[in-house]
Image: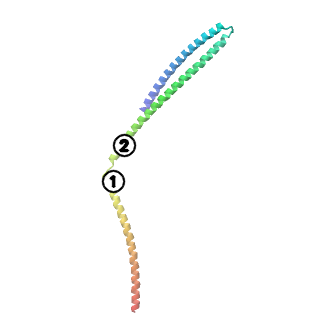
Amino acid sequence: MIKENLLYAAAGVIGVAFLGVCGIAADAIHKLNKTSEKLDIAVEDLYKETVINVPEELVNRTVERAAKDEAKYQVSKAMDKVRNDVVSEYKSDIKTAVEEEFKLQKADLTKTLRKKIDDVDINEIKREVKLEAKQYVADKLKKDLDDISDKYTDQIESMSSIYSTIASKIEAIGD
């Protein structure tokens, strides 16, 4: 939908820009005609006052060249203005579209996250944590008891060996 709106907006902007260019071109042509008329009057006055014969072809080419240069300048200036206006409008439209899309996506993401959070079963998590903690404590206690058992078994074996040695010495003395 945003793409369609952007396309309609772009078509509208291009249409308005085209009409603007046509208007500016018409204004430029009007200005050129006025300039041409002034040049014609000035050339006639100059022609009347001076004795120099300037070929009419030279004057016409000069006037035509000046008119073309002025028209080219005015059209170029108008095109630059229209181009800048169109670019500015596009920037504004794109920025607005991006901001709107961001708001929509933010709302969708917030809704999805809320649903996921609502779906979490806190009691189940508590049970799982308790079971894991019980298992961890049982494993740790078993390991500690195994270590203690190994330590005392080694000590009992050492003491048993010492008592056996003492008993055999006492028996040897008694014989």
Of the numbered discs in the image, which one, if any, rests on residue 125? 1
- Of 28 and 154, nearer the camera is 28
Label disc, if present, on residue 3 of the rendered structure: none
Query: Residue 81 location in percent, x, y?
Result: 52, 25
Who is closer to the viewer here, 80 or 112?
80
Q: How many marks?
A: 2
| Quadrant assignment, res 170 | bottom left
Question: What is the x, y in percent for residue 43?
Answer: 63, 10
Image position of 62 (left or right of 9): right
Label 1 – label 2 distance at C-alpha: 21 Å
> Can you say whether 82 is above or below 108 in the image?
above
Q: Single out the residue that lies furthest toward the front.
A: 49
Furthest residue in direction top, as rendered = 48
Q: Amino acid at mark 1?
A: Ile
What secondary structure is marked by label 2? helix
Where is mark 2, residue-wise? Answer: 112
In the rendered structure, which amino acid carries the disc numbered 2? Thr
Instruction: Categorize mark 2 by other alpha carbons within 10 Å: few (<14), some (14-19), many (20+).
Output: few
